Amino acid sequence: MKIQSLIFLCMVTLFIGCDLFNNEQAKLPGELVPLAVGNYWDYHRWYLSPNIADTIREEIKSEHTFVVDGVEQKMYGYQQFYLQQPKRATSGSSLLAFLENKQSSAPFRYKNDVSTPDYQWLRANGEDGLLSFGGISPSDTLLLRSMQYRYPTKAGEQQEFPTLSYSFSKLQFSVQDTITIETIGTNETFESEWATYKGCYVYRFQEVGKEDAVYIWDHYVYIKPGIGIVAVDTRQHYSGGEDPEDLTIGQWILIDHQLND
């Protein structure tokens, strides 16, 4: 009996040391979104009709060191572009272009289009999550430290985040509206025909109709720690009166990615 008890204790110690008894949230990856030059994420994107879609790539192009608020900070510059070029864009947005779903313009830098300004958005991983640091281009640089997605976090936590844009006509960055980003869940699942991602952190922010404020768009951002943003689900409902059931009107779905060491 003593020998059997000793063997059992040894096996328990071994399993714990190998994390076989730990759940997905017990040991968090070091980074919410892995940042290294050459990393990229390809997204299947549709709006209004799933049958009309395109593919967007977000790729980390450069590494920089700037002094922000008196502190030297390493950060990474990334771009978003179509793998197949649609019509010409007129403005840029820093939030994975979620808000462009309601605009006539497409906020991306087009691959191999020399007439499009070569601008990049800046981000870095911090102790408390993913940080946005503004943008950089040959004609303008805007440095602004903001917490975008808290990590680790818990459901119900919120933070204010200033959205940024880049004007192709003025060739400069500007600060737009401030939005509230709320953590909805920390161990959620997103399923699609391409893949199933478990253990996702889900963050939500809202966009209100610009003209008559009839509609509200809720954007749910699914992030798998150690991989990055795996999906964005955009749902629409009325801002007043009796709300119908939330309707998904657009999605970004991760279909391929590359992460360098």
Image (cartoon, helix red, strand yellow):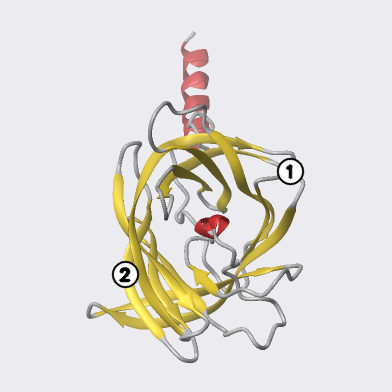
In the image, 105 versus 190, the foreground residue is 105
- Number of callouts: 2
Q: Residue at x 47, y 32 (%)?
A: 16
Q: Residue at x 49, y 8 (%)?
A: 1
Outermost left residue: 70
Horizontal arrangement in the rendering, residue 120 relative to residue 191 (left or right): left
- Is any part of residue 76 visible from this angle? no
Question: How dense is the environment of label 1, judged by Cα within 10 Å: few (below 14), some, or many (20 and up)?
Answer: few
Residue 216 appears at what percent x and percent y?
44, 43
Q: CA distance from mark 2 to mark 1?
A: 35 Å
Tag of residue 178: none
Mark 2 belongs to which amino acid? Answer: Arg
Residue 14 coordinates in the image, percent (x, y): 51, 32
> Dot 2 corresponds to which residue?
145
Nearest the viewer among 2 and 63 is 63
Q: Position of residue 257 (x, y in %)?
A: 67, 58
Which residue matches tag 1? 194
- Is residue 117 left or right of 208 when viewed as pictured? right
Q: List the single residue furthest toward the top.
A: 1
Q: Position of residue 54 (x, y in %)?
A: 73, 58
| Precedes in sequence: disc 2 or disc 1 | 2
Helix, strand or loop under label 2 = strand
| Residue displayed at 32% across by 73% down | 144
Extreme residue in the front direction: 212
Front-most of residues 62 and 82: 82
Residue 219 sits above or below residue 191 on the image: below
Is disc 2 in contact with disc 1, using a CB cutoff of under 8 Å? no
**Identity of the residue drawn at 42% across and 67% down:** 124
In terms of depth relative to the viewer, which is nearer, 41 or 74? Answer: 41
- What is the quadrant of residue 165 in the picture? bottom left
The three-letter amino acid code for the residue at tag 1 is Trp
Residue 103 appears in the picture as rendered = yes
